[in-house]
Image: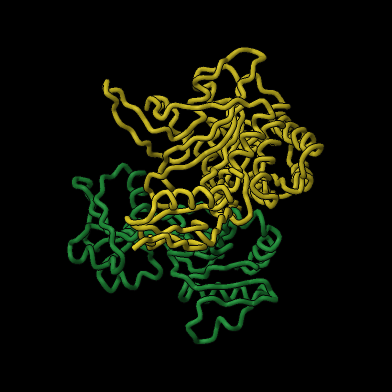
Chain colours: A yellow, B green
Amino acid sequence: MIEKYLKSEEKIIVALRSLYSKYGYLPYKMNKFEEYDLYAKNKDFLVGDGIITFTDTNGKLLALKPDVTLSIIKNASDARGIKNKVYYNENVYRISGNTREFEEIMQMGLECIGDIDLYDMYETLCLAMKTLNTVSSDYVLEISHMGILSALLNSISANDNFKSEIAECIKKKSAHEISAICQKYGVDDEKAQMLSSFVGIYGSPKSVFERLDSFKANNELELAVNELKSLIKMLEGTEDLDNIRIDFSIVNDMNYYNGIVFNGFIKGIFESVLFGGRYDKLLEKMGKTSSGVGFAIYTNLLEKICFDKKEYDVDMLILYSDKSDLNKVQKAVDTFISEGKSVSAQKSIPKKLRYKELINMEAK
Amino acid sequence: MINVALPKGRLGEKVYKMFQDCGYECPSILENNRKLIFENEEKGVRYFWVKPSDVSIYVERGAADIGVCGKDILLEYMPDVYELLDLNIGKCRMAVAAKKDFYDDNTKTLRVATKFANIAKKYYSGKCRDIDIIKLNGSIELAPILDLSDVIVDIVETGTTLKENDLEVKEEIVPISARLIVNKASFKFKTEQIEKITAFLKEQVK
């Protein structure tokens, strides 16, 4: 009965709460405000710049949270063998890339922080797929491994500017810009060619792994590829691999992310709705020794595909006047509600209210 | 169905010709009428003309799956799209131009008139040069002549307009050409069609 009154996005949130709880993730509620310092120290980790700040009554600089992960990390315990598994449903405040204005984003996500192993990474990917599937079966989860890109770049040059310019090309899938950058930094044609062919790699795990085999392996590359292969193998048993693509154009900041990184897309929404990855380096920067992996789905984007079209705002509109018998009005309202109908009692018909049936109880 | 945003004007016509030569023709597009959308159902392609600077918006927000626009637009607006090909047409350069006798002695804030505020800001911040951006929407060449600005940052194709107004290129910022851009979500759900079109277009690039 109550479900009837939930919007599609709300139903999804309820379903996700249940999903995450089943896997042992505990709800995490964060403060409305955090100390600005927490974000200022890790500014590059945040998506986009711009934080809404204000001073509290003691003159301390606070911020409206632009992110949830940093607070969770700050509060996570750091002991061997322990894993903190939490999920959240919070609003965050950021500058929109399109309008350059502040916007409120509804995020639902989970984090697993602690002594992370292959199983935890598998579980996170598995839950990311189940999350997308809760919204629509027509989804794509694309996965990359930051270790593969960094191994490849490290094997070519130690120059940070070169690496970041190439990473930018890979992000845009712009193979045509690789050779000019390689020329600028004195990287030979053979390596430029290898990078160009790397940019074009995209598709099902099987096809991607076949193409990766042609790359000259070094230890770092092999480790990363093997980890990715093991994860895909584990997912094979539980999830539909047809929805997975390997895409190396997901390039998150290498100062924060190390292992797997992934994005989720839902058909009908023009941008990525789910973001996630492994961020051990962020934990390290925050003075923790443990590892972390997690993701968030932007639930505010879901309204683009969730249509709750109703023909009427209310089933019944009861019109009464000052002289009407209010007991009769009250009785009529109660009766309709007990029949499962929605009722609005009004003295005149509101301009924008759409109703199915009009009951006139006006007395002259 | 693949939605293609083409930039209105000469460049767009050249781009359509490339698509046509790849087998994605849509003859109705050449008819002189006021229609906005042109479709060839059999080939699975739908074209529409938009203002060149709007192509990236249509593609980024998924109204078009793919589109063609100048690198200048991509550098200025930094849309979150894939840039799959350099079509090697519509070639020109982004440059700093000024009156022939202008000499920047670095003693004053440089007044820069431009349509491309972000490109100009980035270029001068890379040189640690203090500038005052004057955002204009057209006839940029007029600014230094009327002493509205010291220099302009604009696209230079042949340089004729500059020459006729006694201006000249002082510094080159970046070469510009038309790029094939693709919406990120469309790429996931229409991979095969988009990769096919890209491969065909790549063969046409001279």
| Quarter of image, res B31 | bottom right
Q: Residue at x 65, y 68 (%)?
A: B1
- Using residue A136 as the reference point, say whether residue A105 is left or right of it: left
Residue A296: x, y in percent?
57, 37
Judging depth in this view, the residue of A254 and A64 nearest the camera is A64
Give percent across and percent down for residue B88.
54, 65
Residue at 73% x, 27% y is: A119
- The residue at 69%/29% (across/down) is A22
Q: Residue at x 33, y 47 (%)?
A: B124
Asked whether, in this view, residue A275 is left or right of residue B162, the answer is: right
Quarter of the image that includes the N terminus of chain A: top right
**Circle count:** 0
- The quarter of the image holding the C terminus of chain A is bottom left
Q: Quadrant of residue A131?
A: top right
| Residue nearest the viewer, comparing A1 with B155 | A1
| Residue furthest top in the image | A79
Q: Is residue A155 visible?
A: no
- x, y percentage for residue A313? 49, 57
Left or right: where B55 falls relative to A189: left
